Amino acid sequence: MRSWTPLGLMRYYLAGKSTELGKVTVALIGLGMSNTTLGVANYNSGQTFLDPALVDTALNVVTDQNAPSLLNVTAYFEYMWPRYYAFFSDPLAVNDDLEQFLTDA
């Protein structure tokens, strides 16, 4: 059985069992709690949950205003895949601290 909690999604991803949609979800979790996000408690603290080299691309993936709604997954990925191929095809570099952070929470 899959766990749809942030920790469950993270463990599923780290085990190599995640889908592309799972990757977007992990990116959202990582971006939302990384020191690169304005307004979070650890802003500018050096606590980065995603590879800093991928933060801008991950941010573009989750904020693209032209992307179709995820309610139509097929249209969403037809739009996103060619624009963000590297994001979806390469492993998302997630800091091990993110799993520990979610476990501790």
Image: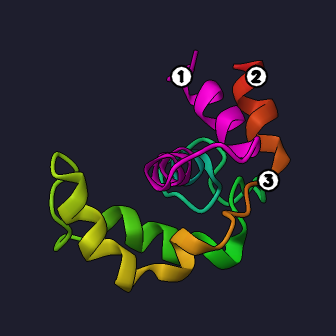
Q: Main secondary structure of the magenta part?
A: helix
Q: Earlier in the sequence, mark 1 or mark 2?
A: 1
| Disc 3 from disc 1: Cα separation | 18 Å
Q: Nearer the viewer, residue 57 or 76?
A: 76
Residue for badge 2:
103
Which residue range is magenta in the image?
1-29
Which amino acid, mark 3? Asn
Q: Does dot 1 land on a helix, a strand or a loop?
A: loop
User: Residue 74 at x, y = what percent?
Assistant: 23, 59
Q: Residue at x 38, y 75 (%)?
A: 81
Q: Mark 1 or mark 2, which is nearer to you?
A: 1
Q: Does dot 2 land on a helix, a strand or a loop?
A: helix
Cβ–Cβ under 8 Å for marks 3 and 2: no
- Residue 5 - label: 1
Which amino acid, mark 2? Thr
- Which quarter of the image is occupied by the C terminus? top right
Q: Residue at x 32, y 73 (%)?
A: 80
Asked if residue 4 lies left or right of residue 79, the reply is right
Q: Quadrant of residue 62?
A: bottom left
User: Residue 36 at x, y = what percent?
Assistant: 59, 62
Q: Nearer the viewer, residue 52 or 12?
A: 12
When the figure is inspected, residue 83 is found, relative to residue 10, above or below; the finding is: below
Asked if residue 86 lies left or right of residue 45, the reply is left
In magenta segment, residue 27: yes
